[in-house]
Image: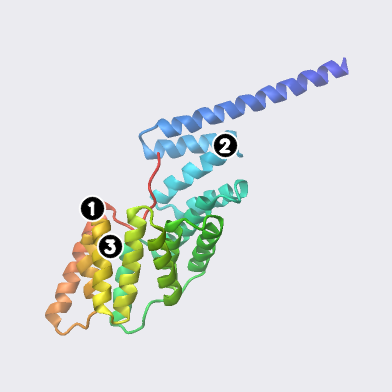
Amino acid sequence: MKKILFAALAYLALTATAGWSQDAMDFYNRGLESSLANKRVEYFSKAIELNPNLAIAYEKRALHYYYQRKYDKAINDYSKLIEFKPLEANAYMMRGLTYLKKERGGWIKAEIDSLRSHFSKQGLPRSGELLEKAIADLSQAIELDPKRASAYSYRAEAYRFMGMTKESLHDSAVAIQLGGDSLSIASAHATRAKIYGQQGQHELAEAEFRKAMELNPRFYVFGFFLLRYFDDIPSLEEVHWMGLVGIIAVAFVLIFQITLRRPKKER
């Protein structure tokens, strides 16, 4: 009798677990099918609640948190994903990029900070525990997938913010050599352009920005803004003009949500 009871309880436990797993996949699939970002997050969260080991749900939810600028939540989900898939290069790359975004803010905000530092003669800030974490994660992604150009491009920008010019130029060159998606390669050219501009090599800077703009039209919005701030400002009139350009760039950011290089979004 006890054996029969034990067998029955074991069967019920197994079927319940299978049912929960199936329900979790149902919610996950609903998340993939939904056209609303908030509903997708809700479905992925329900899937995780029913099956805390469903790695793919953490990955999808993390990407949505990233796009919603909920960086702490995105980092937590990518950390969980890494627990399940410690050899997943993309998980390290995305967590590194999220650290970078959290530390430096949006793309244009970071460049305005650079502009302010340039005119105050203080140079780029070399802060950051988060930047160090970003570099560590991006380095791990590169170790796992040495041909991932986007990881080199992101790490090049992180190195630039840390003031590590040599390392930044090296990673930019590797990203360009490896090729890949046009945004990553354009960003690598833009990173080199900003470094050359800071070094006073204005012809090289302009050439690199032109390459970036040819590869990806989004750089036309910032090309003049980013090139001009490396030159000396001879008059108050030009200072006023620079401020106007900055305001226009910020307006583009607010309207079109242009931010620091985003990965391709998946539903």
Mark 3 lies on residue: 212
Q: Nearer the viewer, residue 222 or 252?
A: 222
Q: Is residue 246 visible?
A: no
Q: Residue 32 occupies which quadrant of the picture? A: top left
Query: Residue 93: horizontal and vertical position, in percent?
Result: 49, 56
Q: Residue 39 occupies which quadrant of the picture? A: top left
Query: Badge 1: how crowded within 10 Å, few (<14), some, or many (20+)?
Result: few
**Residue 153 against residue 32 in the figure, above or below:** below
Mark 1 lies on residue: 255
CA–CA distance between discs 3 and 2?
Answer: 44 Å
CA–CA distance between discs 2 and 1?
Answer: 36 Å
Colour mode of the rendering: rainbow
Query: Badge 3: how crowded within 10 Å, few (<14), some, or many (20+)?
Result: many
**Residue at the image point whose x is 22% and y is 80% from the top:** 231
The amino acid on which the numbered mark 3 sits, given as a three-letter code, is: Ala
**Residue at the image point whose x is 55% and y is 31% from the top:** 24
Q: Quadrant of the N terminus?
A: top right
Pointer 2 and pointer 1: residues touching (CB < 8 Å)? no
Pointer 3 and pointer 2: residues touching (CB < 8 Å)? no
Give the mark nearest the N terminus, 2 or 1.
2
Q: Nearer the viewer, residue 21 or 201?
A: 201
Kind of element beneath mark 3: helix
Query: Residue 121: horizontal and vertical position, in percent?
Result: 32, 84
Give the mark nearest the N terminus, 3 or 2.
2
The amino acid on which the numbered mark 2 sits, given as a three-letter code, is: Glu
Mark 2 lies on residue: 49
**Residue 240 against residue 82 in the figure, above or below:** below
